[in-house]
Each structure stands twice: as structure tokens, then as C-alpha cells.
Image: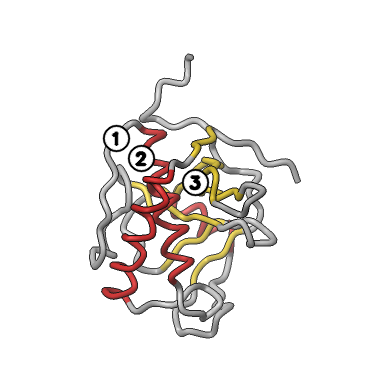
């Protein structure tokens, strides 16, 4: 499968430091686990990097928001980030998602294994993610099934908030 993308955002050391700090706050607040049922500092770190990349793409400020899980992440979107170790990219929707749109950001590592960039892969309406995924699954057996969509061919790579004319 060929995956298109809307943009590639390169991370700075300041971005990585902000994401690390935010992931610590998220863990202290949420005590949540990733979709495989593991403690999720890395998952929250990649999520924060995804939010930073998408905020930069939209040219709006990013703010860490621990404990505010019911509100959309950035500009009305839920941001879903896949870290560099994810073998098969996916976009997911959780039952408590409040946003009507979900954006997928792929976190790419550099040769030194630092998270070097965020690839804005595209977005999809939340209802469409759920419809295309069909049934909810719970890979981590953590009691929080989600709609996991691995067919990313229907992601939209143009965003209504961005002037794509050049």
C-alpha cells in the first residue's frame, strides 16, 4: 500500500523536551496504558510529538493538556500518533472521542533513533473511521476497545484549515 501525506514536520530538541515533559504529566494524570496494555510513557510521548507536529502544520500554538481527555487535541481534531516501532500504521477512534475528525501523524526516527519528524499522513471523519473499521477490538485486553483501522487509503491529505494552493 502506498501512503500519501500532507506534510513532514521536523522536530527540534525543544519539541522533544516539551513532549517528554507532557508525557510525564499525562502519565501522572491518566495512569493509562497503550493499546497493547503496556504502561504508556512512550505512547504519550509520541502522542505529544504528534500534537506538536499537527499544531505546527496548522501554524497554531501547541499546549500540553493533561487530564483533559474529553476535549479534542488540536483545532477540533483528535491526534493519533504511531511511533517508529509500530509495524503497521493505523488510525483509531476511541469510544469517548469528542472530535468529529481524527488526524494520523506517523513519528519517524532518524538513524540515531531520535524522533526526527512527524509525517502528517491525513485525516478522516471519526464516524468514517468507525464504519470502515467495523467492529471494535481490544488488542491490549485493557477493557477499552477501540475501532482500529489499518486500511489508510481513504485518508484525506488536504485540510479545510490550510490553504493548499502553495
Q: Residue at x 59, y 59 (%)?
A: 149
Q: Element type at marker 3?
A: strand
Question: Which mark, residue 36?
Answer: none
Looking at the image, residue 115 sits to the left or right of residue 44; the answer is: right
Q: CB under 8 Å between callouts 1 and 2?
A: yes
Q: Position of residue 22 (x, y in %)?
A: 32, 60
Looking at the image, residue 30 sits to the left or right of residue 153; the answer is: left
Q: CB under 8 Å between callouts 1 and 3?
A: no
Q: Position of residue 162 (x, y in %)?
A: 39, 26
Q: Quadrant of residue 6?
A: top right
Q: Disc 1 versus disc 3: distance between alpha carbons?
A: 20 Å
Nearer-N-terminus badge (1/2): 2
Q: Element type at marker 2?
A: helix
Nearer-N-terminus badge (1/3): 1
Q: Quadrant of residue 64?
A: bottom left
Q: Pointer 3: what residue?
A: 124
Q: Disc 1 versus disc 2: distance between alpha carbons?
A: 5 Å
How many labels, in total? Answer: 3
Q: Residue at x 32, y 46 (%)?
A: 74
Q: Pointer 1: what residue?
A: 60
Q: Position of residue 157 (x, y in %)?
A: 54, 34
Q: Residue at x 29, y 44 (%)?
A: 62
Classed neighbour count for the residue bearing mark 1: other residues with Cα under 10 Å, few (<14), some (14–19), many (≥20): few
Q: Residue at x 41, y 64 (%)?
A: 44
Classed neighbour count for the residue bearing mark 3: other residues with Cα under 10 Å, few (<14), some (14–19), many (≥20): some
Looking at the image, residue 110 sits to the left or right of residue 127; the answer is: right
Nearer-N-terminus badge (3/2): 2
Q: Pointer 2: what residue?
A: 55
> Which residue occupies the extreme top position in the image?
166
Q: Position of residue 16 (x, y in %)?
A: 42, 51
Residue situated in front as seen by the camera: 55 or 115: 115
Amino acid at each position: 500500500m502506498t501512503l500519501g501525506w500532507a506534510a513532514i514536520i521536523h522536530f527540534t530538541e525543544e519539541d522533544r523536551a516539551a513532549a517528554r515533559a507532557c508525557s510525564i504529566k499525562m502519565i501522572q494524570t491518566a495512569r493509562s496504558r497503550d493499546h497493547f496494555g503496556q504502561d504508556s510513557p512512550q505512547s504519550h510521548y509520541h502522542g505529544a510529538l504528534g500534537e506538536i507536529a499537527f499544531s505546527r502544520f496548522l501554524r497554531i500554538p501547541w499546549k500540553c493538556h493533561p487530564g483533559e481527555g474529553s476535549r479534542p487535541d488540536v483545532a477540533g481534531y483528535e491526534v493519533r500518533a504511531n511511533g517508529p516501532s509500530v509495524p503497521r500504521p493505523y488510525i483509531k477512534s476511541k469510544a469517548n472521542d469528542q472530535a468529529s475528525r481524527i488526524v494520523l501523524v506517523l513519528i519517524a526516527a532518524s538513524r540515531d533513533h531520535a524522533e526526527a519528524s512527524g509525517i502528517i499522513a491525513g485525516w478522516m471523519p471519526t464516524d468514517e473511521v468507525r464504519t470502515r473499521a467495523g467492529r471494535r477490538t481490544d488488542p491490549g485486553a485493557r477493557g477499552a476497545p477501540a475501532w482500529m483501522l489499518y486500511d489508510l487509503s481513504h485518508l484525506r491529505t488536504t485540510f479545510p484549515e490550510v490553504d493548499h494552493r502553495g
